[in-house]
Image: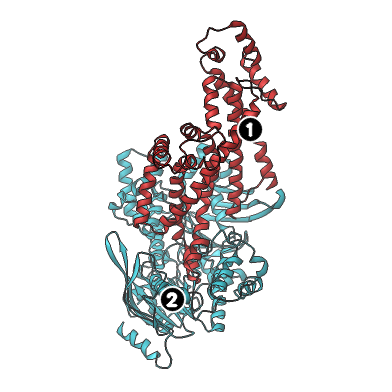
Chain colours: A cyan, B red
């Protein structure tokens, strides 16, 4: 780390750094006393430069960035070190001084576009008050100008709308507009696109790049995605458990990671170099090398039977318009595909492509408008309530949000036992035995049984959700964005777990995701959906190596860091 | 929106019929003969009693009585109370008094509840917050008639800051103390609701973003914390208006306010069916309409809410 510090200092000979963080320590006051969230953090940003902090959640990367704009949570405080903004130490600056700096000198683009705009005020109002607070002209034209610069079409009309009338990408554009509206010299971008679709992500980041280059704004980019950091930033700072473990120019750091944590991050960064996990396994490769590029092996399936067949599936929603007029919206348009037993089929698409609607219909939670779903030779729409109950036992879902899909009032034992009880499986003792086995299968300690979801990490929660889905020994598991909410390292662990379970239990997965890098690692077959239609299907390798549709190519190109070809020895280091 | 409002008004019809039928039936089922009770200790004059029964249709079966009452309503004749005054005139006399009392109580609880709740929320865990929380718990815990008599005695009688009882004119000045007593319970509730809501909103992402924009603390609190926190509070206040009007019986009893509660109590004890039903029906209608207003207000406060027909 000391060499990294030297590196920064060498760069600062010519001009003064815009932001310099020295020996920063941040403590959080909790009921168990002070907790040290960040210590010995060093960081230097020159004017106009982009620096990324990379790390998993809880690594202190956001905390460090928030300290630089004086927005630590109320129980957090700077316990030591300095934050020099343009030479001025702002680590303990007065609130008055910070209000002067915020907006006009240091701007922020927050992480989640859904929760960062006040739902009760119009977009234009929220832009206008920013301009006004920083003493800039704030007429309707100025507001529209700011919004259109951020790439929002039809800005004057859009300014009169409320946040809920905007899509996620548009909201993020509005937030970028707000963050850059007063032309700050430093922009803190805290995971600015992690909540967005991959193609939208690329557009937004490109636009942010263009704008900050034009304005000469320095950017402090916070991300958990090493590929994205390497692609967008001049320098990368890696944080782990509150400390800066490595720092340096992006490509150099990526090609030659020295700290073990950085090496792990580089090796598990999902990218196009990855291959199917299970395939790698069958070659006898060590589990740590699973994501390394290997030659694909064609696996002959013993039971090539179609366990699930979707034929001409269509779903039309009626949208309520003004004055009681309704318009039809075709969410899923004539989609057909089949899933072979024991394999993984991924449905890929952006939000709004209809992929989750397909999942809901396959789960029989939503009735199709036309077309049919055949499970194990039986049309699922013809099931009576008893057959449906049996069907539910054989087809189980795992959902995206491990925070929302577990009942906070149920302990882990009760959560996993519930499906067994609902389906009247076994007695109390045998159910408890089963729960213990399930916890073993998903590599959770048995002591977790008495704990509650809020006491577990995101990855552990998703393991609980997997255990719950497995409780009834299902044949098919529908994973609706099951790993999208997880950090990259945890994501790799959960994907490995799913692959293991598949080979041990012969499970069939239908994997709904927007993340092509994940598809590459887990799926045998891919269905690409765009605006309700199936635009491309094929084996994963075919689709990735020679995509036929422009849309698929666009999706593949949008993967952060896709073009950064890493030498294979790096990934296996 | 217009269709939605129309629909809500059409819902008033079954509510009106149901409420009148139910209340009429309850009064009809009261034990004892109201006409006999009118004679008090004096011997009952059967001829007079029979004439009175005929006049108030008390000699008819329940359905006939109820239908005659309904017919009266639709011909704008609510009948007379036992002292011979038109019920419509009685309503016109008592409702303005109680409405004034309820609105004053509402203003009291809204203004003080929101201010105290906001400050407590912003200073969560500090001295002011703890004090206000304990005080509000005490207010919620003590029955209103205890608080009423206590305040009447200390502020009204001993300190002489306000009149302990209300004159027959029931002026705004007269009603200050009763309004505070009436609003106290809801005041504590509004305070706690505002506090919780403020604390929740303070930690919202958009509040942090608002601060990051460079807004002053005052503006962040007023525009982004308070405004959003008021949504559940206003919903409660609207629904509370109806509850305050109906719930004023105890307060009106303590301070001798010539309002709905007092008159309703007398009508119930005397078994004056039409008077009871008329008063209760108006209360029910006020309740339903104020709830409709709350729903409309809610849509105005929170643009994400849309009412479809």
Q: Which marked residue is nearer to the observer: mark 2 or mark 1?
A: 1
From where the camera sits, is residue A376 visible? no
From where the camera sits, is residue B89 visible? yes
Q: Chain of mark 1?
A: B
Residue A527, position as x, y percentages in the image: 56, 61
Residue A315, position as x, y percentages in the image: 63, 51
- The answer to whether A423 appears left or right of A544 in the picture is left
Secondary structure under tag 1 reads: helix
Q: Which residue is mark 1?
A: B92
Q: Are marks 2 and 1 on the same chain?
A: no
Q: Which mark is residue A97?
A: 2
Residue B227, position as x, y percentages in the image: 53, 57
Secondary structure under tag 2 reads: helix
- The answer to whether B98 appears left or right of B79 in the picture is left
Q: Residues within 10 Å of mark 1 (few under 14, many from 20)?
A: few
What quarter of the picture does the N terminus of chain A occupy?
A: bottom left
Q: Work out whether A413 lies above or below A66.
A: above
**Which one is in front, B9 or A18?**
B9
Q: Chain of mark 2?
A: A
């Amino acid at each position: 780390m000391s060499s990294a510090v030297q590196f920064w200092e060498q760069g600062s000979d010519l001009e003064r750094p815009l932001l310099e963080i020295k020996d920063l320590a941040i403590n959080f006051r909790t009921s168990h006393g002070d907790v040290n969230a960040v210590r010995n953090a060093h960081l230097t940003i020159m004017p106009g430069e982009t620096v990324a902090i990379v790390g998993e959640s809880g690594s202190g990367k956001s905390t460090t960035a928030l300290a630089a704009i004086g927005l630590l949570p109320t129980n957090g405080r700077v316990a030591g070190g300095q934050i020099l903004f343009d030479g001025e130490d702002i680590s303990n600056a007065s609130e008055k001084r910070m209000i002067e700096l915020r907006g006009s000198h240091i701007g922020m683009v927050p992480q989640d576009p859904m929760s960062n705009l006040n739902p009760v005020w119009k977009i234009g109002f929220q832009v206008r008050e920013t301009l006004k607070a920083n003493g800039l002209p704030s007429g309707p034209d100025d507001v529209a100008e700011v919004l259109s610069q951020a790439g929002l079409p039809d800005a004057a009309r859009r300014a009169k709308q409320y946040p809920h009338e905007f899509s996620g990408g548009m909201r993020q554009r509005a937030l970028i507009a707000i963050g850059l509206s007063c032309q700050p010299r430093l922009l803190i971008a805290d995971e600015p696109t992690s909540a967005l679709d991959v193609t939208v992500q690329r557009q937004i980041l490109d636009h942010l790049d263009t704008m900050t280059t034009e304005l000469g704004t320095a950017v402090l980019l916070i991300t958990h995605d090493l590929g994205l950091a390497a692609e967008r930033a001049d320098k990368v700072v890696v944080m782990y458990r509150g400390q800066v473990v490595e720092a340096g120019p992006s490509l150099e750091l990526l090609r030659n990671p020295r700290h073990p944590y950085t090496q792990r991050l580089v090796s598990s960064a999902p990218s196009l170099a990855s291959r199917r996990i299970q395939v790698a396994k069958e070659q006898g490769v060590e589990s740590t090398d699973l994501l390394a590029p290997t030659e694909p092996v064609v696996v002959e399936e013993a039971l090539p039977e179609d366990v699930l067949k979707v034929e001409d599936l269509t779903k039309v929603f009626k949208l309520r318009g003004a004055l009681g007029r309704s318009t039809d919206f075709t969410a899923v348009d004539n989609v057909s595909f089949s899933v072979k037993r024991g394999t993984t089929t991924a449905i890929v698409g952006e939000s709004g492509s209809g992929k989750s609607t397909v999942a809901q219909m396959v789960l029989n939670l939503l009735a199709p408008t036309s077309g049919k779903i055949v499970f194990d030779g039986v049309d699922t729409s013809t099931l009576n309530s008893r057959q449906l109950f049996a069907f539910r036992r054989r087809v189980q879902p795992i959902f995206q949000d491990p925070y929302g899909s577990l009942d906070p009032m149920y302990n882990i034992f009760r959560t996993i036992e519930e499906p067994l009880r609902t389906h009247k499986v076994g007695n109390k003792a045998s159910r408890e035995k089963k729960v213990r086995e399930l916890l073993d299968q998903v590599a959770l300690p048995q002591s977790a049984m008495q704990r509650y979801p809020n006491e577990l990490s995101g990855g552990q929660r998703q393991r609980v959700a997997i255990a719950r889905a497995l409780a009834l020994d299902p044949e098919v598991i529908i994973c609706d964005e099951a790993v999208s909410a997880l950090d990259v390292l945890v994501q790799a662990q959960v994907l490995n777990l799913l692959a293991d379970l598949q080979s041990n239990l012969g499970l069939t997965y239908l994997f709904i995701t927007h993340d092509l890098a994940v598809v590459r690692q887990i799926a045998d077959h891919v269905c690409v959906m765009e605006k309700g239609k199936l635009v491309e299907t094929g084996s994963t390798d075919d689709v990735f190596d020679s995509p036929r549709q422009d849309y698929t190519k666009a999706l593949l190109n949008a993967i952060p860091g896709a073009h950064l070809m890493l030498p294979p020895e790096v990934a296996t280091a | 929106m217009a269709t939605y409002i129309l629909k809500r008004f059409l819902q008033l019809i079954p509510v009106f019929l149901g409420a009148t039928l139910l209340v009429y039936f309850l009064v009809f089922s009261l034990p004892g003969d109201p006409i006999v009770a009118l004679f008090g200790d004096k011997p009952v004059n059967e001829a007079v009693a029979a004439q009175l029964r005929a006049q108030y249709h008390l000699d008819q079966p329940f359905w006939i009585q109820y239908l005659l009452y309904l017919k009266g309503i639709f011909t704008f004749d609510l009948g007379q109370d036992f002292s011979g005054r038109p019920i419509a005139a009685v309503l016109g006399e008592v409702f303005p008094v109680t409405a004034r009392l309820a609105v004053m109580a509402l203003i009291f609880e809204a203004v003080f509840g929101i201010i105290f709740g906001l400050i407590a929320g912003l200073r969560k865990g500090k001295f002011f917050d703890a004090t206000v929380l304990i005080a509000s718990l005490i207010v919620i815990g003590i029955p209103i008639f205890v608080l009423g008599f206590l305040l009447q005695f200390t502020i009204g009688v001993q300190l002489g800051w306000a009149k302990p009882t209300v004159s027959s004119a029931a002026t705004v000045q007269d009603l200050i103390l009763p309004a505070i007593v009436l609003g106290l319970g809801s005041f504590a509730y509004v305070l706690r609701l505002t506090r919780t809501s403020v604390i929740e909103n303070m930690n919202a992402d958009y509040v942090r973003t608002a601060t990051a924009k460079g807004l002053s603390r005052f503006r962040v609190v007023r525009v982004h914390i308070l405004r959003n926190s008021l949504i559940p509070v206003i919903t409660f206040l609207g629904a509370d208006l109806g509850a305050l009007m109906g719930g004023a019986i105890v307060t009106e009893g303590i301070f001798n306010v010539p309002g709905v509660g007092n008159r309703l109590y007398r009508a119930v004890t005397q078994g004056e069916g039409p008077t009871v039903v008329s008063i209760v029906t108006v209360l029910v209608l006020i309740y339903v309409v104020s709830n409709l207003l709350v729903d409309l207000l809610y849509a105005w406060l929170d643009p994400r809410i849309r009412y479809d027909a």
